[in-house]
Amino acid sequence: MAEYYRDMGYHVLFLADSLSRWAEALREISSSLEEMPGEEGYPTYLASRLSGFLERAGVVETLSGRIGSLSMILSVSPPGGDFTEPVTQACLRTTGSFLMLDTSLAHRRHFPAINWFQSYSLYAKDVAEHYRTKISAEWDPLLVRCRQVLQQEESLREVAEIVGSEGLQDLDRLLMRTAELIRTEFLQQNAYSEDAFSPPDKTLAIMKRILSAHDRMAEKLKQGVGLEDAMK
């Protein structure tokens, strides 16, 4: 049905929930037909079936000269959150982007609960080029710095759980505070707020404000000022 409207020159969004249940049904049918089972009992052609389905998305030029497109947003529900199982791995080899929903973030009431380390997009360079030319040349450096802060905070979290936050140096405590601001003010969305959409220029301003405040306080710490005084 989606391809029918795409061939008429429309831009179609196709949503499917969930590929895991479809794959389980395929496994049951394959077992009933006594076909050769593959990994975890799935048929050996599972990956080719999934890739053939996913590759039907894209942009086409119709016979009338119009441009139509078919975009897919699909979900995978791996049992027990195991991302090494065959269905998830087959999808990862074919899809252009992947958003991992993290149960630990959901338990902390962080929504959307998208894991910023495991998620990826093959279109990141194209999107970054668009923002760099249309919004600001600072987009890429700010994005890279935000990722670095979150990665450093992840490694410091293990140390903080052992010695406590008071046992960390002031620069490390400042970094953890900045990472918390990035999570709560930038990555987290309040479902009860009217501000459900952030335009690119506002997104850029939020990133600049958080990182600029971090740089100012870090400079004060290097001058010998205590963390509490630097945060005033």
Image (cartoon, rainbow, N blue to C red):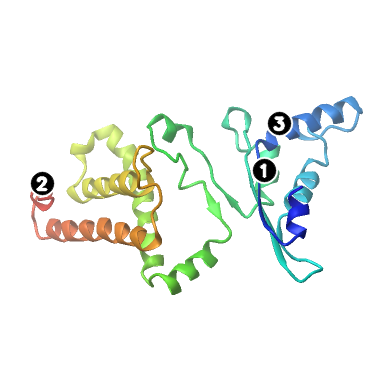
Q: Element type at marker 1?
A: helix
Give the spatial CA distance, label 2 vs label 3: 53 Å
Q: Amino acid at mark 1?
A: Gln
Q: Element type at marker 3?
A: helix
Q: Position of residue 221 (x, y in %)?
A: 14, 56
**Which circle's residue, 2 or 3, is located before the other in the chain?**
3
Q: Residue at x 13, y 50 (%)?
A: 231
User: Does residue 121 appear left or right of residue 111 in this picture?
Assistant: right
Q: Position of residue 89 (x, y in %)?
A: 67, 43
Label 2 with label 3: CB-CB less than 8 Å: no
Q: Which residue is mark 1?
A: 89
Q: Position of residue 225 (x, y in %)?
A: 8, 54
Residue 21 marker: 3
In the picture, residue 18 is in which quadrant? top right
User: Does residue 225 appear left or right of residue 160 in this picture?
Assistant: left
In the picture, residue 140 is in which quadrant? bottom left
